[in-house]
Image (cartoon, coloured by chain):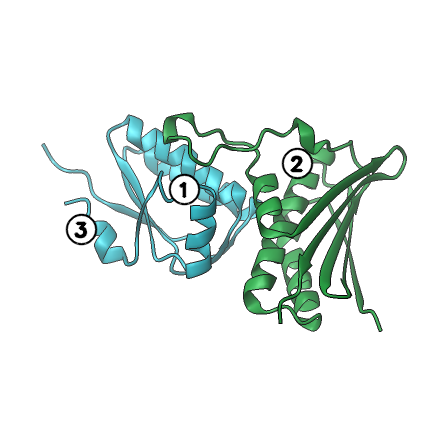
Amino acid sequence: MSQKYSLNVDSRFERLAEIADFVADAACACGLNNAQTYDVQMAVDEACTNVIEHAYRGKPDGTLDIVCERRGKEFVVTIQDYGAQFDPREIKLPKTSDPLSKRSIGGLGLFFMRKLMDRVEFDFAPGRGNRLTMAKKIKT
Amino acid sequence: MITPQISIVTPQGRLDAASARSLEAELQQRIAAGETRLIVDFESTRYVGSNGLRVLLVALKQVQQQGGALKLCCLAPRLKEILAMAGFDRVFEIFDTREQAEKSFE
């Protein structure tokens, strides 16, 4: 039987703590260990921060639909928003080897999402908004 | 010349995009007041997201321009790894204890 956990929140940074708790509960129920749960929580935190900042441009009345589920040996998180298109190709990833004077400030969120998850996929359709799917292999 | 005091900042709980704003305000206030020898103690911090890291990076650049330093201490093991993942371990001085961080200013 597949377990599915859903959360619907508005686009405010103050909601991030609630999202983190929701992800932790779902991840624990799906059999992820503490380290894996931490990684998924961080990836979701970064993803939702990006949605609020970029897709909704800081407007608090947007909606985020977050679904967590176990699919076979993967823990899959889907984040749906209805804001402006987010194109990951427009984000310049940070060069982590750069010295301080050259370090850029942006792109860190996306960098962590890709580092912490096994799969990160962006999908956008007009009228439906952005759908982000992230998966992490469950290690037992 | 009097050596400026060491200031210690202790973020609590989660340092996400919401709480990064108050850390930013606190650091900016301290830097504006001439406090350029800073330690951020993560003893009570269980999570740091990229917005929190950005706030630290901006503050570090500012204090260094003024001849000061911003050092980090007491990071949980996974937090330390996350910082290393982004190359922040080469940018920040990181100490296991607050005492070590304080001593490094001597």
- Measured in 3D between alpha carbons, the distance from the residue under mark 1 to the one under mark 3, in whole angstroms, is 21 Å
Residue drawn at x 34%, y 38% as measured from the top left:
B30
For the N terminus of chain B, the image quarter is top left
- In the image, residue A30 sits, relative to residue B63, either above or below, namely below
- Measured in 3D between alpha carbons, the distance from the residue under mark 2 to the one under mark 1, in whole angstroms, is 23 Å
Residue A50 can be seen in this image: yes
B16 on left or right of A12:
left
Q: Are marks 2 and 3 on the same chain?
A: no
Residue B103 circle label: 3
Q: Nearer the viewer, residue A106 or B63?
A: A106
Q: How many marks?
A: 3
Image-quadrant location for residue B66:
top left
Tell us which disc is closer to us: 2 or 1.
Answer: 1
**Three-letter amino acid code at disc 2?**
Glu
Residue B8 circle label: none
The residue singled out by tag 2 in the image is: A53
Q: Colour of chain A?
A: green
Q: Nearer the viewer, residue A127 or B37?
A: A127
The chain drawn cyan is chain what? B
